[in-house]
Image (tube, rainbow, N blue to C red):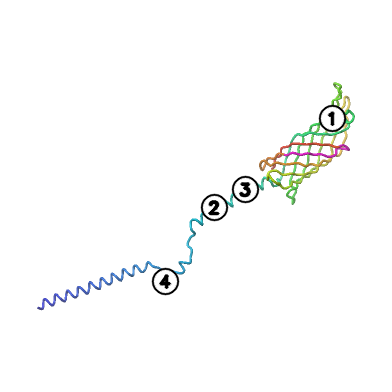
Amino acid sequence: MGRILFVLGLLVSFSATAATVTTKKTTLTKTTTTKTEPPPDLLPLLSNKTLSEPPATHAAKTSTVTTESTSQSVTTVRHHITSTPDWRFSAGPGMVFYGGNLAKSTGTGTAGYALNIGALTGLSGYENIMVGADLGFNSWSYDVGTPGANPSASGVQVLATVIYQFPSIFIPELRPFAGLSAGPFVYVAKTPGSNDSTLYLEVLLRPGLLYQASSELAFGLETKFGILGTDFVFAPQLNINLSL
């Protein structure tokens, strides 16, 4: 009887110990599970805080930045093409229609040929104004019907020049301009056996168009006209311009 009671006591003690271990294990499990959840007082903070932007929003902002950068690059290039350069050098052929003394005395045509070389620089403080000089060589020949007796004439001009470039209207690379040139013109009339040199004042108005093919290269068309001495002169010209 005593042994039976002893065994029953051991069984009751073992059962209590097992129940206690099971309870502790359950408690530990619950505690571990509970630690993975954020405390209730931090939930509002976590829900209101944006940790990162959605991929779609980030991609949209990247696209916007790229578009703006490309637009700025195109604007910069276009501004460089159409803005006034520091220096512009030009050269080109042209025609010269002039009723000088040989044309009047011989009664023949007044068409001649010219080659002009020019240099212009931007005027400080005035974006669209350029100033410089124009050097020109002119030549005329007259046919009076007598072999060996045909007179000719030539001329050299050194003209101070100012040009105003108007903003482009339809084509960004095409800009109209207007200018004024004035200075001395040495006119040499050549007849058989004699040369007669005369110094004149030449004043020319210079309307034209400039097509800017690139930031360094441009093509120009001028329809210059004015007074050489006391006679009217018309001198249309094509030229190539190099900008530095």
Residue tagged 1? 109
Q: Is residue 227 left or right of residue 19?
A: right
Q: Identify residue type, mark 1.
A: Gly
- Location of the C terminus by quadrant is top right
Q: Earlier in the sequence, mark 1 or mark 3?
A: 3
Q: Quadrant of residue 37?
A: bottom left
**Which range of residues does the magenta coloring cover?**
220-231
- Determine the residue located farthest toward the front in the rendered image: 170
Marks 3 and 4: CB-CB under 8 Å? no
Q: Nearer the viewer, residue 188 or 169?
A: 169
Which-is-in-front pick, marks 1 and 3?
1
Q: Identify residue type, mark 2.
A: Ser
Residue tagged 4? 40
Q: Position of residue 140 (x, y in %)?
A: 82, 30
Q: Earlier in the sequence, mark 2 or mark 1?
A: 2
Q: CA distance from mark 1 to mark 3?
A: 51 Å
Q: CA distance from mark 3 to mark 4?
A: 55 Å
Q: Earlier in the sequence, mark 3 or mark 2?
A: 2
Marks 4 and 2: CB-CB under 8 Å? no
Marks 1 and 3: CB-CB under 8 Å? no
Q: Residue at x 88, y 34 (%)?
A: 198
Q: CA distance from mark 4 to mark 2?
A: 40 Å
Residue tagged 2? 63
Quick check: is 221 in the magenta stretch?
yes
Q: Position of residue 227 (x, y in %)?
A: 85, 39
Q: Quadrant of residue 15?
A: bottom left
Residue tagged 3? 74
Q: Please tell me whether residue 102 is drawn above or below residue 128 in the rendered image.
A: above
Marks 3 and 2: CB-CB under 8 Å? no
